[in-house]
Image (cartoon, rainbow, N blue to C red):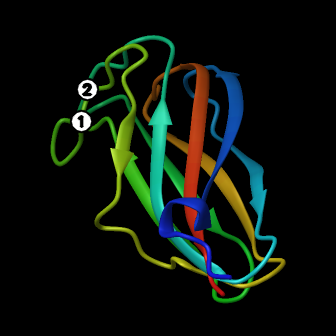
């Protein structure tokens, strides 16, 4: 019996919580249970985050095992970035890299601040992945 594409797609949702501005962090969020492909990443914050070219934050999902690398990053910098509206997911299904999952691969959420950065409030990170047969 083959699973449908919808059934094969799983979502991991991780509550990161609060992290003050000027305080970068990196936290484990996901260990792959098997082989597959990451098909989407989203970042949702409980409060708005304004853009700034002086004090901005870069958020990312990182692969920590195998060939380590960034899956997706987003910045609040005015140049090339985006603001966050409260409770509005920043969802990405294109522009993803390092998306091949192998059983046991570990992934993290990373926050890097430039200048004073920005606070995150009750940040929710989701990783969507499709299981290989």
Which one is nearer the viewer's eye here, 88 or 121? Answer: 88
Q: Which mark is residue 9?
A: none
Q: Which mark is residue 51?
A: 2
Callout in the foreground (2, 1):
1
- Percent coordinates x, y for residue 80 in the rendering: 18, 48
Q: Secondary structure at mark 1?
A: loop
Is 18 rendered above or below residue 78? above
- Percent coordinates x, y for residue 56 in the rendering: 37, 33
Identity of the residue drawn at 27% across and 38% down: 77
Instruction: Please tell me which of labels 2 and 1 falls first in the chain.
Output: 2
Is 56 rendered above or below residue 70? above
Residue farthest front in this picture: 1
Classify 10 Å Cα crowding around label 1: few (below 14), some (14-19), many (20 and above). some
Is 36 rendered above or below residue 122? below
When asked about the image quadrant of residue 18, the answer is: top right
Identity of the residue drawn at 48% across and 29% down: 44
Which one is nearer the viewer's eye here, 13 or 62? Answer: 13
Residue farthest left in this picture: 79
Residue under label 1, please give it. Answer: 82
């Amino acid at each position: 019996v083959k699973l449908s594409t919808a059934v094969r797609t799983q979502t991991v949702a991780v509550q990161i919580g609060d992290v003050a501005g000027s305080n970068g962090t990196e936290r484990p969020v996901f260990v792959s249970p098997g082989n597959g492909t990451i098909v989407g990443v989203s970042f949702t914050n409980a409060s708005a985050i304004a853009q700034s070219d002086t004090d901005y934050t870069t958020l990312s999902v990182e692969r920590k095992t195998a060939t380590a690398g960034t899956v997706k990053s987003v910045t609040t910098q005015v140049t090339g970035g985006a603001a966050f509206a409260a409770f509005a997911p920043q969802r990405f299904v294109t522009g993803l890299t390092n998306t091949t999952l192998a059983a046991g691969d570990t992934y993290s959420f990373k926050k890097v601040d430039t200048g004073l950065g920005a606070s995150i409030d009750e940040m929710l990170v989701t990783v969507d992945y499709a299981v290989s047969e």
